[in-house]
Image: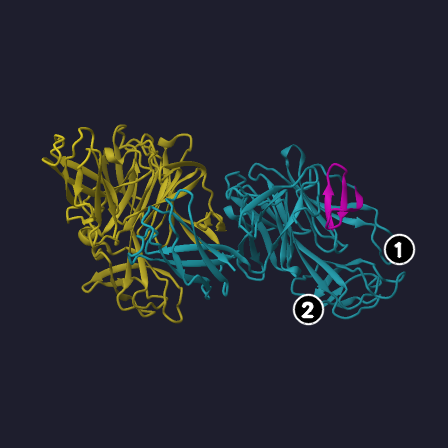
Chain colours: A yellow, B cyan
Amino acid sequence: MIQKADDGTLAFSYPLDTTISSEVTSLEHDGESFWTQENIDDGDPDAGFRIRRWLIENFVMVLQQTFLFDTDANDTFESEAMTIEHYEAVFTSGAVENTTTFTVSFETDIFDLITPGTKLFLGPSTKVGFVGENESVTVTSTGPGKLITVSAPLTNGFLSSDDLVFSKNIWFFNEHFQKSLDVGALYKVNALDGSILSRDQSGAYIGINATTFHELDSFTGDLATNNKPYLVFIRTTNLLFLNVNDSNLTIELSSVQNNLSADTVEVFDVSDIGIEGETIFRLQQKFNINGSESTSSTFNYQLATFVPFPIAIALTAEPAILPADSGASNSIITATVTDQYNLAFVTSPAATIVFSTSGGGTGANISPTGSQNLDPNGQAEATYTTGDAAGLVTISAIVTIN
Amino acid sequence: MPINVQLPDANFSTGPEVGFFYSCDFDNQRLVRVQADGTFAEGLPVARSTFRNPVKELHFDGTFFWTLEDLPSSLGVVIKRWRISPFPTAIFPGVTPFEFRWQDEVTLINGPNMRWSADAFAIEHYHLKFDGSFLQGVSAIKVDDASRISPGDKLYLGPSGFGVTGTFVGNQEEITVLSVNSTTGDVTFSKGGGLENSFLSDDPITLHKSIYLFNDNSFGGEDDGDGNLVNFDYPSRQQLFTDNGAKYASVTAADFSGDILSWVRAFQIVEIDFSTPSLDLSVSQESNLVEDDLGTLIEVFDMISDFDNDQYLKLQDRETTESLATGALTTEVFPSPRKYNFQVQPTDSFVNSVAMEFSPNRFVKPLPSADKIFITTHVRDQFNFPVLNETVDWSADINVASDPGSVGTFNPASAVTNAPGIAETVYTPSATPNDMIIDITADLA
């Protein structure tokens, strides 16, 4: 496994202690372990795949577990995307070494997901004498006040706000729901033993090459209700946000991406995705940046953001056709600004919009001409007044983010 | 300085003549000695054996050379021990060497349960010294470190520095250890007439103990991508241990020096320190073995551990260098047929990578918004350890795909890395309202 800087500089590499015989199609990190997915047979993708968990130990990537998903009488396994459902928490008031209990707190309260048998990865510690230390523990019980009891005394001490992570399930997108050929499926697998817990079928699960799991916390305003853990995946040009803790596995958000050719004909493959803060890294070989396309023989990332930004302005005119009657008639122009989530674009303070017009002859104008705020629906209005020439009138609008 | 020894064969080592490099010349069946600039100095024909295939690795233990070759017809591999002969002894003190003489070999033939496929090996050997002067005829000596010596071991003494030319100077001999005191360094031996020569304090002694072979096949003999480190006692050939793992696979170069077994694994040089009881890796360092496409591995064909000078010498047929002015990488392929040269890999820490972390976002709105990017720059050395006290300068440029406009500012524009190897700054965007793409760079002063 290689470790690179942003510009591709090779910083370090870790030999694998166990050979991988096929190309890794998905790589995930859950805060403790790396997870890889690889086909059993590169030449026969529907023969199945394996998911492996690795830890870096002594400069080496050491294999911890292998879960095999080989095609059998019940399922045809063909997948290139998997992720690990994992959560982050912090110590509420620290933990003393050689004790077995501590309390935790969360950005999103998912305490109920911590059940007996859950493995917690604690650290790194910031407590003097244990700085930088990590350890794994197994939960035996939980109690009121988000109290956790573990099976063995802690080796290290931890301070308030020190981190801990835990993983619950593996999720992978299968090109087949069991043996079917025309519908995809999302499989839920126990991360501890590799057993299949559930299968959910949907056409939205076909052709998925990139997915990850992330606890979103960067939405503000009305979108803040969407700050929760999501399984995030790319379906053609959309980043979809699936709530795995909803029994219906609802897709709660969709964000359009620009992995699309300049002529909007070709969808560029996204091979993997990573998330850091508010930034999405899409691993691609083809790019469209500001309308300039490029192709690379290697894989590079293209950036996208969770932060809402205006992606479309829809203008309507009511009425749309007017006589050229030199100011006797007018039309109400309404601009509706939407963001990448196809939601009304609103920022605080509100973004501003400026209307302009061309054509229509002498006297044609739009009012107001200066900038005005978008309303809470992402909309603004202006009035077009006719001129003295018949013909096409073009009305434009430019949105500025404050 | 990529061109140096200019060897036509993919093997090299140091040898008895300090400052020269040695290599086995398969086409001409000889050991060649060259200067560091490739100037030919000497060629010694092989004797009592031949190279049946090109030598994959050459090692020098202080007295003997050791080679690794494939056996013909894919039968396995063979490790041979050689010596430049004749060499001065008490009986023939004035001889001049004229051949590269085979001494012994360890033949590893494929069997039903084990197949041998190896490009790298190392000889566990130790450079000892006389602790005091010892005269001809004595049957006990004292060495500076007897911790690795066992009864029955052979010690190769000399060249002697005792006396003047024509007496003992330059002479060599061997003894077989009878008893050893590992604390005091006292060694007794059985030899009719005792020492043949007299020796001075600090005269060299060579001890070789075992052979480490990197078998590309796993312990079961399968070519499954797992490798196998096999340790044979020498000269008994008894297999002392094996350790299986992918970290031993695809190893093309290895060496042993001090207590350190080093080898090249993909982009890294890794080490095991045998002064500790485990087979855990003690060090791993990124070793500039990637071409300028940032992905293609550069093969190392042979390697010398030169810990006295804090460096490894890696024999390669190409190398990647970095422009100090621009940071641009260039891979140069060395010209055939003398296409093998060495590249130096220091073992002293140096800056190997500079990585940036952006928070809370890589996307910001222009002034007068309050948006800022907090930039954390991580400076690491080749061991992936933080580097302290490096001055980092940040700069911003407009990407070619960007709309026009102005870049923002950094505060501070320069900072020094702390103990965790981190330097921090804050980027404030300009007031340009366009859709701008900014390349932010961190350079070390």
Rendered image: mark on residue A187: none
Q: Amino acid at mark 1?
A: Gly
Q: Is residue B411 visible?
A: yes
Q: Secondary structure at mark 1?
A: loop
Output the chain of dot 1. B
Q: Position of residue B74 (x, y in %)?
A: 63, 34
The residue labelled by disc 2 is B181
The mark that comes first in sequence, 1 or 2, is 1
Q: Nearer the viewer, residue B176 or A331?
A: A331
Q: Which residues are magenta?
A: B21-46
Magenta span: helix, strand or loop, mainly?
Answer: strand
Q: Report the front residue among B314 and B443.
A: B443
Identify residue for label 1. Answer: B94
Cα distance, mark 1 to mark 2? Answer: 35 Å
- Magenta span contains residue B189: no
Q: Are marks 1 and 2 in contact (CB under 8 Å)?
A: no
- Residue B196 image offset from top left, x and y in percent: 84, 61
Q: Residue A199 in the image: state x and y as whole percent.
A: 24, 38
- Does B44 appear in magenta? yes
Q: Please state which amino acid type lies under the numbered disc 2.
A: Asn
